[in-house]
Amino acid sequence: MLVNAYGAHAGDKPLEPLRITRRAPGAHDVQIDIAYCGICHSDLHQVRAEWAGTRFPCVPGHEIVGRVSAVGAQVSGFKVGDLVGIGCIVDSCKHCPECEAGLENYCDGMVGTYNGPTPDEPGWTLGGYSQKIVVHERFVLRVRHPVEQLAAVAPLLCAGITTYSPLRHWNTGPGKKVGVVGIGGLGHMGIKLAHAMGAHVVAFTTSDSKREAARALGADEVVVSRNTGEMAAHAKSFDLILDTVAAPHDLDVFLGLLKRDGTLTLVGAPPTPHPAPGVFNLIFKRRAIAGSLIGGIPETQEMLDFCAEHGIVADIELIRADQINIAYERMLKSDIKYRFVIDSATLAA
């Protein structure tokens, strides 16, 4: 079927209206009428060919929410009318140790929601800046938030799980002290989630003007990372620091804030490497630097359920499809609190 979408024909071209083809639902497929799609910084990098391997036309979008409009004959977990979401993954090998453990995000055969290999036309996946999408039932997620919150749920499918997964993996909870570096699309979700998990949350920012905003999100304390006195007051005290910043910066200043066996986990993806940290900052306190990539399907469902239970959604600005290019430019200037979401109804001809 032909549906309306927004995408680009080249990395140096703006996004524009397109008509794309979606497959008819197979036996195990779920067809979704997309209501909203969040805009992730990854979308910008991929569609502008700043990351290698972009195929054009490129239709970004992996923070998708909407309603089921058709199901395949062998689908039993979803029915027409259900509120559902699609995140960053639409396929995987389904049989490797990672897939069997529900960690499809680490499968070597993971297929992204856009720009991934598929037998569908045109040969690569086309994402959520579109009216409809058809996905195997294994990768469809149930949304339990009230329908009036649906637009603000969309960013949970990437920003939410990207921060939830490491917080859960490193056992965030009461009695733990957790830092969140950066107060943007990822960071604002990290603060909300860590607070809801019961941790003592400290937000790190380079801007004194963001103190009140960080506290409003749930931070117990806010530290301006350029203030050496404020930083020194937290030396050797953190169990976990979640670094969401997508630009190269000095990791040593945060490593020194970890207690023995503490972990600095990187979820921001800078275009060039961070400066190499000092080895003594690691070995003398058995500290660790780790990374984390989104989350598997079971954990993403767990995250959505946790957020529904605790009333957590993203802070968003809702836009029309014809405002996407403007949103990209504003995103580059950090002129958003904290996530753009596209109203997919505006894709209608």
Image (cartoon, grey):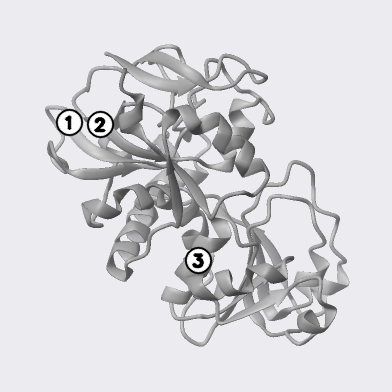
CA–CA distance in space, label 2 to label 3? 33 Å
Q: Amino acid at mark 1?
A: Ser
Q: Position of residue 339 (x, y in %)?
A: 50, 49
The answer to whether marks 1 and 2 mark residues whose Cβ atoms lie closer than 8 Å is yes
Tell me where residue 262 sits by quadrant.
Answer: bottom right
Residue placed most toward the observer, 54 or 348: 348
Vertically, is 110 above or below 241?
above
The residue sitting at 43% across, 30% down in the picture is 321
Residue with the mark numbered 3: 169
Q: Measured from the top left, where is residue 133 in percent x and y?
A: 32, 28
| Residue depth check, mark 2 versus mark 3: number of the one nearer the observer | 2
Q: CA distance from mark 1 to mark 2?
A: 6 Å
- Tell me which numbered mark, 1 or 2, is placed earlier along the sequence: 2
Residue at 68% x, 56% y: name it: 245
Is the residue under label 1 in contact with that under label 3 (CB below 8 Å)? no
Residue under pointer 2: 33
Q: Nearer the viewer, residue 126 or 151?
A: 151
Above or below, 279 relative to 219:
above
Does residue 209 appear to the left or right of 47 in the view shown?
right
Q: Is residue 242 left or right of residue 76?
A: right
How far from the left and from the top, in percent, is residue 21? 34, 14
Above or below, comparing residue 253 to residue 27 in the picture = below
Q: Callout 3, which amino acid?
A: His
Q: Nearer the viewer, residue 217 or 83?
A: 217
Can residue 167 be seen in the rendering of this structure? yes
Characterize the local packing of mark 2: few (<14), some (14-19) or many (20 or more) Cα atoms within 10 angstroms.
many
Check disc 2 and report its element: helix, strand or loop: strand
Residue 19: give x, y in percent of width and height. 38, 13
Q: Is residue 166 visible?
A: no
Residue topped by disc 1: 69
Q: Amino acid at mark 2?
A: Asp
